Amino acid sequence: MKLRKVTAASATVFALALTATACGGDNGGGDSNSGSGGGKTITVGIKYDQPGLGQKTPQGYAGFDVDVATYVAKKLGYNADQIEWKEAKSADRETMLQRGDVDFIAATYSITPERQEKVDFAGPYLLAHQDVLVRADDNSIKSPADLNNKKLCSVAGSTSAQNVKEKLAPKADLQTYPTYSACLSGLQNKAIDALTTDDSILAGYAAQAQFKGKFKLGGFKMTNENYGIGIKKGSDLKADINKALEDMVADGSWQKAVDKNLGPANYKNEPAPKIGDIKS
């Protein structure tokens, strides 16, 4: 009797093992092409809160980074409805790639030596610069030095304003706000004099319908920010993504995406960078 019980239990375990094998258990990770039922998808990380670049809206997802990611995904064999979007906050991007939570990230992701130690990058696909946004009728700030004794806003945790104060305008009066939208409101009501971060981000905010014509970019080009598409270290997607980015530039889709998303702020973009050309 005892032997018979053990044998029955063993048979049950064996049957369960066969079932699990047949189902091809889900190990997590970033292999979006696997899975039964033909549900081929790709998972892409973007910002959800940057107008003009990556924004989640009631109508869906919009912005330059979204357009770039959608184009790249199509070249990789995925239609727009096969993309699963995930929010990629700045502090989470390397971890998301390392864990395989996403296949790639397009989220104002500047290529830096420190980040390249942890993840790989395709691109760059946009050369941005640190700049300032001021009121359209303010002609008193014509160079970074004019920010001395001015109220300069950036968001909590950003190094942009500190960079200005340390290197360009030591007498700037730093003002820290929780969000860029709060900085914009302060700029509009004259509580602050200028907002600083990447010019592409500034242009995205200024291009919103409610702010059209109210702000202007300084055009100071205080740093080079080489936006790349982040991928997991050693990913074989790099070459295909680089080819997709080259195709996007060649067929005119890249410039159309810039003009559509950032053009309303009179954003003067740099020419599309060559793959692997990272400006220091």
Image: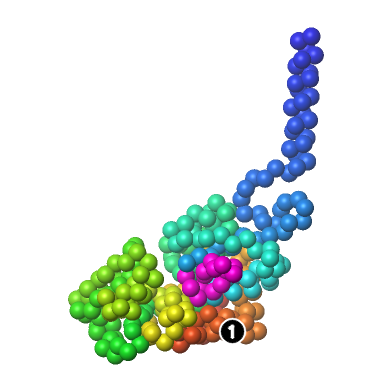
Residue 165 image offset from top left, x and y in percent: 25, 73
Dot 1, crowdedness within 10 Å: few (<14), some or many (≥20)? some
At x 52%, y 60%, the residue is 87
Quarter holding the N terminus is: top right
Residue 118 image offset from top left, x and y in percent: 48, 58
Q: Which residues are magenta?
A: 50-63
Determine if the magenta segment contains residue 52.
yes
At mark 1, the secondary structure is helix
Residue 247 is left or right of residue 122, and the answer is right
Q: Which residue is mark 1?
A: 256
At x 76%, y 22%, the residue is 10
Residue 140 image offset from top left, x and y in percent: 26, 88
> Which is more toward the observer, 117 or 39?
39
Residue 85 is left or right of residue 164, and the answer is right
Q: Amino acid at mark 1?
A: Lys
Q: Is residue 244 visible?
A: yes
Quarter holding the C terminus is: bottom left
Which quarter of the picture shows residue 279? bottom left
At x 53%, y 80%, the residue is 261
Q: Is residue 203 visible?
A: no
Q: Is residue 57 above or below residue 38?
A: below
Q: Is residue 9 above or below residue 78?
A: above
Residue 5 is left or right of residue 109, and the answer is right
Most extreme residue toward the top is: 1
